[in-house]
């Protein structure tokens, strides 16, 4: 029997918020991923990196403040660092969990770049807050460099970067080759390293990419059977967080678009996941999207939990 090919997108809950929390969190995450492997899925995994890249950016900025001969690390370098260390933790935890279940499979992490449009509107209206709190003086210095900052009353200023739309995954052929060889692949971590192509040269962009947007693009490019988005809630809800909150067990693309137009999904949480589902299904109408939580994976595979979205 052919294995079901799936892209799995992991949210913040799968990784925790600090290095020590991540070591513990990935053990739980590995159990959910191993459940999918035992259910005969061939996995390609992507993950968030918001907390991790922000931590790295803070550390590199402070290093520059203390040792002035050090060059500040641009966002693209911080993104690459986060992909490496998050992938390292996931692949080792998953390998250990699989071996413990008597399953021997290679798990590989691919440092992944994703092209973006330099004229994307996101570069003119950045929204992603990163890094440490700064004084007004430091914020002014960032503005003079051409960067954006945002004031949080009573706390200080923080840098804000763009979140442009992903265009192409540079290493997609390598990802596809390993996946077709039966390996579990971790790729496009944190949305991938955003790059702009100029005269055939890839140059890092001062931005971050929404990891759900890349998950949809990755699933579409690989033509997988399913896109599985693991998040902090067991399913998608109508009127989420309100007294009349209602679980939604299934949706079509048309219904999902209607709910988006109604403003049912919050911009920074569920909306990117629904948009990723739409991107994937419009290119792969025979596919299926499952949105659920890490702890509900087994029940969701039995269609007793989660939300299924189809074309």
Image: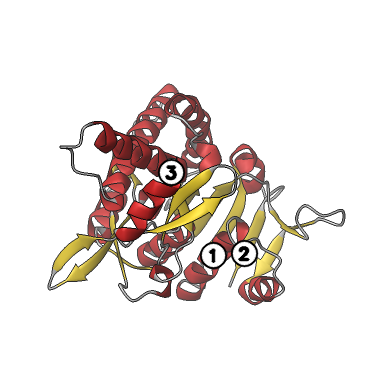
Report which residue position mark 2 lands on: 309
Q: Which mark is residue 207?
A: none
The reply to whether residue 11 is visible in this rendering is no
Report which residue position mark 1 lands on: 277
- Rendering coords of residue 279 (x, y %): 49, 70
The crowding category of the residue bearing disc 3, from other C-alpha atoms within 10 Å (few below 14, some 14 to 19, many at least 20), is: some
For label 3, the SS is: strand
The crowding category of the residue bearing disc 2, from other C-alpha atoms within 10 Å (few below 14, some 14 to 19, many at least 20), is: many
Camera-nearest residue between 3 and 190? 190
Point 61% across, 73% down: residue: 253
Report which residue position mark 3 lands on: 134
- Rendering coords of residue 149 (x, y %): 44, 56
Q: Is residue 292 left or right of residue 195?
A: right
Q: Is residue 232 left or right of residue 186?
A: right
- Find the distance from the CA under tag 1 to the CA under tag 2: 7 Å
- Find the distance from the CA under tag 3 to the CA under tag 1: 37 Å
Camera-nearest residue between 218 and 240? 240
- Viewer-nearest of discs 2 and 3: 3
């Amino acid at each position: 029997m052919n294995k079901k090919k799936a892209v799995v997108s992991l949210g913040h809950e799968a990784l925790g918020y600090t290095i020590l929390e991540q070591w513990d969190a990935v053990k739980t995450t590995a159990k959910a991923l191993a459940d999918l492997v035992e259910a005969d899925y061939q996995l390609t995994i992507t993950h968030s990196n918001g907390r991790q890249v922000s931590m790295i950016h803070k550390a590199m900025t402070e290093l520059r403040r203390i040792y002035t001969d050090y060059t500040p690390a641009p966002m693209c370098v911080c993104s690459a660092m986060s992909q490496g260390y998050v992938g390292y933790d996931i692949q080792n935890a998953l390998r250990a969990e699989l071996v413990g279940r008597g399953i021997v499979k290679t798990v590989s992490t691919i440092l992944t770049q994703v092209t973006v449009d330099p004229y994307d509107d996101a570069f003119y209206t950045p929204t992603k807050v990163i890094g440490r709190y700064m004084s007004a003086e430091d914020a002014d210095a960032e503005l003079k460099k051409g960067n954006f900052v945002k004031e949080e009353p009573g706390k200080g200023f923080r840098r804000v970067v763009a979140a442009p739309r992903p265009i192409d995954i540079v290493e997609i052929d390598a990802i596809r080759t390993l996946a077709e060889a039966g390996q579990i692949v971790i790729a496009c971590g944190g949305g991938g390293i955003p790059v702009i192509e100029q005269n055939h040269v890839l140059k890092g962009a001062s931005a971050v990419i929404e990891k759900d947007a890349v998950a949809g693009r990755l699933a579409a490019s690989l033509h997988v059977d399913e896109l599985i988005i693991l998040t902090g809630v067991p399913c998608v809800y109508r009127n989420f967080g309100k007294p009349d909150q209602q679980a939604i067990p299934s949706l079509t693309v048309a219904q999902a678009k209607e709910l988006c137009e109604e403003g049912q999904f919050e911009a920074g949480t569920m909306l990117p996941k629904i948009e990723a589902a739409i991107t994937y299904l419009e290119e792969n109408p025979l596919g299926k999207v499952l949105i659920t939580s890490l702890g509900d994976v087994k029940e969701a595979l039995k269609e007793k939990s989660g939300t299924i979205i189809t074309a």
